Amino acid sequence: MKDLHIQSNQFVLPQQFETLKKLCQCLGNQDFFVIGAAARDMLSIALDIDLSTRTTRDLDISIAVESWDSFMKIQELLISSGFEKDNVRKQRFYYKDFELDVVPFGKLSEDGAKIYWPPEASPEMTVRGFESVLKECVNVKVDDAAIEFKIPTTAGLFVTKLDAWIDRGLEKDNDMDDMMYLVDNYYVPNCTEPAYTEVYDAVEDADPFVSGAYMLAMDASLLLTDEEKAYYRDVIEKELTKQETSLLIQKSMKSSKKDYDTVYRAWELFVKRLVQN
């Protein structure tokens, strides 16, 4: 799926559309993509599945920039265009009281994995995989191309959520809720696609949840670099060795409402397929 056509009245919140419209007018050709729950809801529309019960009242975007100086110029442009800057949170803006988080990535990242906000190098945020995700985005056209922007593919969004959970998994469950929602809803819309036929050999009982995890791993493996895949493999395999005490497993069970064996097998097959050559 390369293009998605939706209508402005399909947005869960009208303020999301208004903020995105203003962003598109302001940023022009600057590369950015919508992440978080707003992207999740748009993918739900594309897959024709029920929207997640976890709603959002903000908008998250990530933007590719060359340097912090470049980002500060974008910040100044946003402010001059009517966005208000939060006094404390460095990534946060408001448009008519609607929250907007803008996370930069790209060459300003020292290691390609994290950004450190100047001048104190705080907060520290994970952006691992963002450049890989940007290469294979879905182009969203609203109201017959009145505005256009990008969102990650389902696998790309899953990767950004996995990164966020690794970064802040102990703080809240939102990222895991979204990951499990994507896993639980990926098999049925895609199960007849020829590209996924190998899943029937890999998942013997064709469990939709486990199959969804395997199919997401297939897609994620095409997005990520070998270094990124090795990183996720190491994190997940370390969690799997903990078995019932693993926070990854415990949080997955809570969010998906699946039993231990199902969740463990889903993650086991996910990581196995992710690094498969």
Image: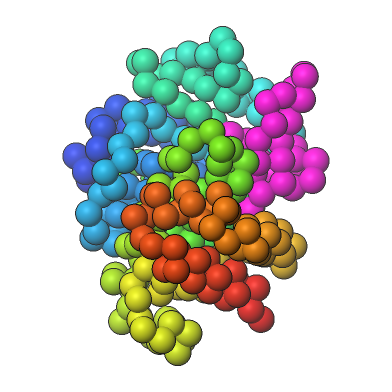
Q: Nearer the viewer, residue 266 or 227?
A: 266
- Residue 18 x %, y %: 31, 28
Q: Nearer the viewer, residue 71 or 165?
A: 165
User: Does residue 170 show up?
Assistant: yes
User: Does residue 145 show up?
Assistant: no
Residue projecting furthest to the front: 244
Q: How is the image coloured?
A: rainbow
The relative height of residue 176 versus residue 132 in the rendered view (above or below) is: above
Q: Residue at x 57, y 25 (%)?
A: 91
Residue projecting furthest to the top: 87
In which quadrant of the rendered image does the C terminus lie?
bottom right
Q: Residue at x 72, y 46 (%)?
A: 113
- Residue 4 x %, y %: 33, 57
Q: Quadrant of residue 263?
A: bottom left
- Residue 43 x %, y %: 34, 54
- Residue 66 x %, y %: 72, 38
In which quadrant of the rendered image does the N terminus lie?
bottom left
Residue projecting furthest to the right: 110
The relative height of residue 204 versus residue 177 in the rendered view (above or below) is: below
Q: Quadrant of residue 259?
A: bottom left
The range drawn in magenta is 103-129
Q: Residue at x 71, y 36 (%)?
A: 115
**What is the magenta segment's predominant secondary structure?**
loop
